[in-house]
Amino acid sequence: MKTFCGRANPTTGAMEWLEEDENYDYHQEIARSRYADMLHDKDRNVKYYHGIRAAVSRVKERGEKAIVLDIGTGTGLLSMMAASAGADFCYAVEVFKPMANAAVKIVEKNGFRDKIKVINKHSTEVTVGPDGDMQCRANILVTELFDTELIGEGALPTYEHAHKYLVQEGCEAVPHRATVYIQLVESKRMWSWNKLFPVHVEAEDGEKIIVSPSEMENCPGVPSVCDIQLNQMPSSDFTILSDVVTMFSVDFSKPVRSASTYYRVQLEPVKSGKAQIVLSWWDIDMDPSGMINCTMAPYWVKSTSAFQWRDHWMQCVYFLPNEEPVLRGEKVYLTACRDEYSLWYKLQKARGEEENKTDIRVESPVCRCQAHLLWNRPRFGELNDQNRTRQYIKSLRKVLKTDSVCLCISDGSLLPVLAHYLGAKQVNMLLFFQFFKANHLEDKIKIIEARPELLTSSHLEDKKISVLVGEPFFTTSLLPWHNLYFWYARTAVTSHLTSNVTVLPQSASLHMMIVEFQDLWRIRSPCGTCEGFDVQTMDDMIKNSLNFRESKEAEPHPLWEYPCKSLSDPQEVLTFDFRKTVPQHCLSTEGSVNLSRKGKSHGAVLWMEYHLAADISVSTGLMQISNEKGNCEWNPHCKQAVYFFSSVIESETLSDLPSAVTYAINFNTKTGEIAMDFKL
Ligand code: SAH
């Protein structure tokens, strides 16, 4: 069956109706899922297996039959582990239909058809009894329902329900317990993801400072978790203010309560500083004694020998509502509030214990300043990047004149403010933006709430635009080239531009480089077998979903979190001239890129560079190749596009390398899509 889905094209801005196969979402979900990453997580798998064996033994030693309930079975892996460990019967519950179907096949292929029953339901729909999904309640509860924040995938309500209706009292649970840890830090880098720092502009008539509104200073922000690969954060980017402290634990073998609550700990700062950030991670004990422990602790906390790379579980960064100065040795209270699915933190100076308690409200934070709705965390970081701002100021200074009539097209941009301070006569901004009041600019910058194609001369008070600026940045952009929307918007407003209009950036270019990833390759690499179980059905399913669209697609990843080394020189592959309108014909290129370093060619990385003025460019991708090994440094505020090759080229010595990778890249100006093909 086909369905039609309406959406605004992120690149062209056009409203379009796409004919989507009804399976499209399934395929997207499978192709981009974390199942492969979980199956590659050796540390996790080994520890689950160990914990499951121990739980089955304990039940058997009591002379009971081992009846397992595996909630969220995925491939059926944990149930197969239980059956191999001697469990008498397993109920494997999986809500996602394609996965439940795959689990049936995998269970059958591995010879567990008599021992494992796959139930394609949400666990809260499962029935128990002679005619039910389960004959009787289970006495071993196995699950892996955790996300980086532990509870974000609904583990708590699922456990609460399972203890009430699906498992026996006193059951064994694998994992047995989870513990959430925190550490208080000061970090200008991470704080810059949550607050806007003052922007200094050297104007003709002295220094101007763009400040954030006071509502923003005190705004608690949005409750969505900020999960990152904290192991990629160098220790020089933060200052530790407290020891690692246990925030709370959940015992999964006992009834679990999911209702909103809070936990609080007393901290004694080990250093004076500004408390800004709570870093957090968790571990799970697979057994009651805590001998089988799987931890997400970052590098400065655990020994490197215990290190396992994984992307399905990372670490959390929580922003305190305000920065709070703390003194070494002077006690403070940290409160973690949670609802069923998320957590947030508050810090209080130690006063009377009772006094503090009355302050606690367990409502989830709501952004009051609008900025956290407009700017996501990387965007805050980008706007706070002074180096980047300097490039824009330098370029604006070159192009602005006292009679400039300026139009800015970019989402939530500070460019209009910069343009105003740098002397533009009139500044207009397409799209709505709340920010100007705090800087007393309401009457200096005109906000035009119209799409570019609906712009009229009366919006512009019958003036022509002499300077058109954009960062460009649009919140709808996922892949780097989606920001080419600026070019389409520029084309749409052409009739309002003066004949000698200056467009900033004047052009953009798409760049490409072949890389070897240290770890990211795992998320798209087949597993074959996992702990001795044949999971190839899963590999085939992912491959099938990846090939579902005729042309494979590139995917966005923030590469500062995923180390890689360059195997080729970076290469400019396409250019886009914003001084002209978008052409009718496609832009395509073919060529080859030499492999200059030995390694595994996992894929190509693509990114955009914007040429603000003749000699001023900003890169949203590669910043530099930092050493002779080819380690790459990426723009920390942007996602780059990664195109994984379907087969990896491996080489030990340069001589047996194919010396080049050939490519064909096509930008379809009608659809705004970039299709690419690589041959090794
Ligand atoms: N157990 C597998 C897969 C874990 S991924 C493994 O360890 O490799 C978690 C899976 O749980 C997902 O497939 C998700 O669809 C499923 N899931 C989450 N909550 C569920 C619930 N309450 N009932 C049934 N399935 C659930």
Image (tube, grey):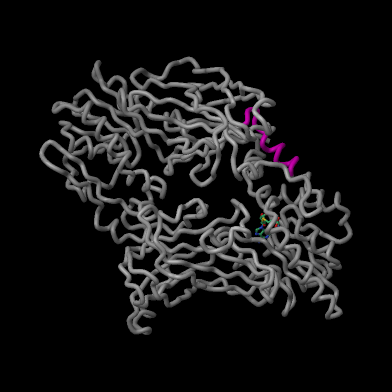
Left or right relative to 111: residue 13: left
Give above or below for 433 relative to 113. Answer: above
The magenta stretch spans which residues?
Answer: 539-552
Residue 268 painted magenta: no
Residue 25 shows up from this direction: yes
At 22% from the left and 23% from the top, the residue drawn is 466
Q: Quadrant of ligand 1?
A: bottom right
Residue 473, position in %: x, y?
A: 38, 36
Left or right relative to 321: residue 540: right
Q: Which of 629 and 614 is in front in this view?
A: 629
Residue 621, position in %: x, y?
A: 45, 35
Query: Which image quadrant: the N terminus?
Result: top right
Query: Which image quadrant: the C terminus?
Result: top right
User: What is the quadrant of residue 499 in the picture?
Assistant: top left
Residue 546 painted magenta: yes
The residue sitting at the left extreme is: 205
Residue 142, position in %: x, y?
A: 72, 66
Left or right relative to 20: residue 569: left
At 22% from the left and 35% from the top, the residue drawn is 419
User: What is the quadrant of residue 186 in the picture?
Assistant: bottom left
Residue 493, position in %: x, y?
A: 32, 24
Give above or below for 318 relative to 233. Answer: below
At 17% from the left and 47% from the top, the residue drawn is 440
Residue 465 shows up from this direction: no
How many numbered discs, if any? Answer: 0
Q: Which of 80 and 122 is in front in this view?
A: 80
Give above or below for 297 relative to 459. Answer: below
Left or right relative to 543: residue 88: right
